[in-house]
Image: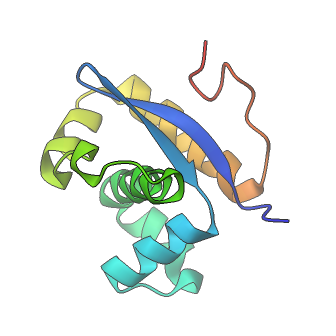
Amino acid sequence: MNQLSGKFEVQIGEESHTCHLSMNAFRILCERENLKFTEMDAYLNDQSLTAITKVIYYGILNNIYSTRGKLDSLPEYEFFASQLLSDVSSLERYTELIGKAFAGEALGDEEAGKK
């Protein structure tokens, strides 16, 4: 069973995107950002703003792949990051949700953004 997993909704402008953090999402991130999985903790601490936005972005991409969704629904990264970083309170909540995914904790509907 994949303990490193979590799903939550991410609001970018008027659109909601499902972020599915799983081993595959971290594989995609490591591959595209030229990281080793063992470097993930240092990456999250040393480059936190970039790391948080990239983790969420690749989690959304992972969800698109795993649900056979449309890739054109994924916003361009720099737009995505600018929108995500414009709301500090949401950024803090997403940071908590990433931590829970790393810990393998199940997210309740309210935590996952499904009210």
**Residue drawn at (51%, 65%), measured in percent from left and top?**
25
Quarter residue 14 falls in: top left
Residue situated furthest top in the rendering: 115
- Horizontal arrangement in the rendering, residue 29 relative to residue 32 (left or right): right
Residue displayed at 41% across by 24% down: 89
Residue that sits furthest to the right in the current view: 1
Depth order, front residue of 19/51: 19
Q: Position of residue 17 (x, y in %)?
A: 40, 35
- The location of residue 79, given as percent across then percent down, is 14, 43
Q: Nearer the viewer, residue 95 or 24?
A: 24
**x 66%, y 18%: residue:** 110
Closer-to-camera residue (14/53)? 14
Seen in the picture, residue 115 relative to 27 is either above or below; the reply is above
What colouring does the structure picture have? rainbow
In-front residue for pair 113/46:
113
53 relative to 17, above or below: below
Q: Residue at x 61, y 12 (%)?
A: 115
Picture quadrant of residue 55:
bottom left
- The image position of residue 47, as x and y in percent, is 35, 65
Q: Horizontally, is 13 left or right of 29 in the view?
A: left
Disc tally is 0
Where does the N terminus fall, quadrant-wise? bottom right
Q: Position of residue 26 (x, y in %)?
A: 52, 70
